[in-house]
Amino acid sequence: MTHREDPPQELVVDVFARGCTSRAAFEDVTGRWASLVLLALGEGRFRFNALRRKVEGVSEKMLSQTLQVLERDGMVTREVLSAIPPRVEYSLTPLGAGVAERLRSLADLLESAVGEVQRARERTAAR
C-alpha cells in the first residue's frame, strides 16, 4: 500500500483557498472595471479609445491596468496591427469569452431587476 500525500498547495483548486490561482483570477474578473471590460469585449474587438468610450467613467490608466491584468490571466488578447500609425485591438480569448458570457447573464439579471433594486434601496434609505 502506497502512502498518499496531500497535493502541493499550488495544485489545490478551490476558490475559497487563499493561495489558489482561481481565487486570484476571480478577484481580477470581479473587479469593477474588469467585469465591464469583459462585457464590452463580449460584443466584439475594440481599440483602446473605443473601449474607453464604451466603458463610461474608466480612466485611461485604469483601463490600461485592467487590460494588462486580463491579458496576464489569459482572458484578453492584445493584437498590434500593421498600420501607420500602428493600431492595437483587444479581443477575448476562449476563456475570456466564457467568462464574459456568464457575466452577461448576471448583467441581464441585474438590468431586469433595476426596479426591484431601486425599491429596496429606497426602503433602506427610509429607515
Image (cartoon, helix red, strand yellow):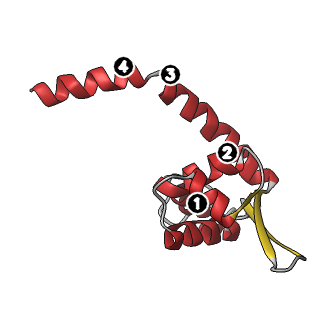
Where's the C terminus, which quadrant?
A: top left
Q: Position of residue 49 (x, y in %)?
A: 64, 64
Q: Secondary structure at mark 2?
A: helix
Q: Secondary structure at mark 4?
A: helix
Q: Which residue is mark 4?
A: 116
Asked if labels 2 and 3 touch by Cβ distance under 8 angstroms, the answer is no
Q: Which residue is mark 2?
A: 100
Does any portion of residue 105 appear in the rendered image? yes
* Residue type, numbered disc 4: Glu
* Residue type, numbered disc 1: Arg
Q: Residue furthest bottom?
A: 85
Q: Secondary structure at mark 3?
A: helix
Disc 3 to disc 1, C-alpha distance: 25 Å
Q: Residue furthest right?
A: 82
Mark 1 or 2: in front is 1
Q: Which residue is mark 3?
A: 112
* Residue type, numbered disc 3: Ser
Depth check: give the residue in front, 70 or 111.
Answer: 111
Q: Please tell me how crowded label 1 is: few (under 14), some (14-19), or many (20+) other residues with Cα within 10 Å.
A: some
Depth check: give the residue in front, 108 or 54.
Answer: 54
Q: Please tell me how crowded label 2 is: few (under 14), some (14-19), or many (20+) other residues with Cα within 10 Å.
A: many
Asked if labels 4 and 3 touch by Cβ distance under 8 angstroms, the answer is no
Disc 1 to disc 2, C-alpha distance: 17 Å
Q: Position of residue 40 (x, y in %)?
A: 65, 48
Where's the N terminus, which quadrant?
A: bottom right
**Residue under the point 66% across and 58% down:** 50
Q: On screen, 85 above or below 21?
A: below
* Residue type, numbered disc 2: Ala
**Residue under the point 64% across and 51% down:** 38
